């Protein structure tokens, strides 16, 4: 026990005179206090705070002659000091608990950032990522060709959530949204991008931290702080099987194509 903690407990218990049983290892200069000695006799040290005394009682002590172990009530300041010291571990534990995210953890996901001329592409894919000669890649090439963009995009960077395996790290949707925004901003800072095409549910975190209904952004374009406007569509693996999403995507492309057409 640290010296400050020990003293706080003794003061709060009202022990005003005491002697240590042995030298404290963490306090070489531990003070020794003794009660005032009455006239004609030697005073008895009050060691009630650290256990019963091992010294025998004087032989001539009568049945009513006991060591004076009466202690004064602890002053309010001492009580407050004890409460503060005793509750310190609980307070520290509470701080650690509060540091944990209150929102539920978001399931792991994997995104890739591609570049297709003046348009960046954020794709939700399964690991190890989008591979050439696969159906999703061929679909992406068809979409880019129809939109007047280079149909051979270049892989630029990838994003994996969670960022760390540490269980104490905040894994909520809010944290994932902040991390994704920072990731895209950093990667596109030096790129001449006028639009960001997002395919997949988790890409919606780029515009909204609410991951419960990401599909509400499909078919829409959103303005983003510090980034080019982003447009959202279903994932490349879902598009072929959902005709309504393909219609939504084509209508969306006709609205956003002028962004890169005007640049030519």
Image (spheres, rainbow, N blue to C red):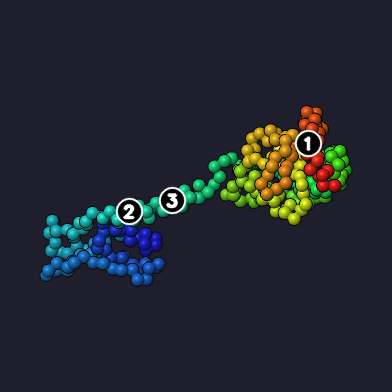
Q: Is residue 103 left or right of residue 196?
A: left
Q: Residue 11: in sight, yes or no?
A: yes
Q: Quadrant of the N terminus?
A: bottom left
Q: Circle 3 sits in a helix, a strand or a loop, which is it?
A: helix
Q: CA separation, marks 3 and 1? A: 55 Å
Q: Circle 2 sits in a helix, a strand or a loop, which is it?
A: helix
Q: Position of residue 218 (x, y in %)?
A: 73, 34
Residue at position x 35%, y 71% in the image: 29
Q: Residue 239: in sight, yes or no?
A: no
Q: Position of residue 100 (x, y in %)?
A: 54, 47
Looking at marks 1 and 2 on the same chain, the residue that comes earlier in the sequence is marked by 2
Q: CA separation, marks 2 and 3? A: 15 Å
How crowded pointer 1 is (Cα within 10 Å; few <14, some 14-19, many 20+) is rated as: few
How crowded pointer 2 is (Cα within 10 Å; few <14, some 14-19, many 20+) is rated as: some
Q: Is residue 36 left or right of residue 147?
A: left
Residue at position x 24%, y 63% in the image: 17
Q: Position of residue 114 (x, y in %)?
A: 79, 48
Name the quadrant containing residue 43.
bottom left
Looking at marks 2 and 3 on the same chain, the residue that comes earlier in the sequence is marked by 2
Comparing 38 with 198, the one in front is: 198
Which mark, by number, is residue 183? none
Q: Nearer the viewer, mark 3 or mark 1?
A: 1
Residue at position x 14%, y 61% in the image: 61
Q: Circle 1 sits in a helix, a strand or a loop, which is it?
A: helix
User: What residue did someone put label 2 on?
Assistant: 80
Q: CA separation, marks 1 and 2? A: 67 Å
User: What residue did someone put label 3 on?
Assistant: 91
Looking at marks 3 and 1 on the same chain, the residue that comes earlier in the sequence is marked by 3
Q: Position of residue 67 (x, y in %)?
A: 18, 60
Q: Is residue 195 left or right of residue 106?
A: right
How crowded pointer 3 is (Cα within 10 Å; few <14, some 14-19, many 20+) is rated as: few
Which mark, by number, is residue 255? 1
């Amino acid at each position: 026990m640290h010296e400050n903690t020990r003293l706080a407990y003794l003061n709060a218990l009202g022990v005003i005179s005491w002697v240590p049983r042995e030298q404290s290892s963490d306090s070489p200069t531990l003070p020794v206090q003794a009660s005032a000695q009455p006239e004609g006799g030697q005073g008895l040290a009050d060691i009630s705070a650290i256990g019963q005394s091992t010294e025998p009682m004087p032989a001539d002590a009568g049945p009513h002659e006991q060591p004076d172990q009466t202690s004064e009530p602890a002053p309010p300041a001492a009580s407050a000091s004890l409460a503060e010291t005793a509750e310190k571990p609980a307070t520290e534990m509470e701080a650690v608990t509060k540091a944990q995210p209150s929102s539920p953890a978001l399931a792991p996901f994997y995104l890739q950032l591609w570049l297709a001329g003046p348009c960046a592409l954020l794709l939700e894919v399964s690991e190890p990522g989008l591979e050439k000669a696969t159906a999703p890649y061929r679909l992406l090439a068809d979409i880019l060709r129809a939109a007047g963009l280079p149909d051979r995009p270049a892989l630029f960077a990838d994003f994996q959530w969670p960022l760390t395996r540490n269980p104490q790290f905040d894994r909520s949707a809010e944290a994932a949204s902040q991390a994704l925004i920072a990731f895209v901003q950093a990667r596109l800072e030096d790129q001449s991008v006028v639009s960001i095409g997002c395919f997949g549910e988790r890409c919606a975190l780029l515009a909204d931290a609410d991951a419960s209904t990401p599909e509400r952004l499909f078919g829409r374009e959103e303005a983003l702080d510090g980034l080019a406007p982003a447009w959202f569509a279903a994932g490349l693996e879902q598009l072929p099987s959902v005709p309504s999403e393909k219609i939504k995507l084509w209508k969306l492309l006709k609205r956003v194509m002028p962004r890169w057409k005007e640049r030519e």
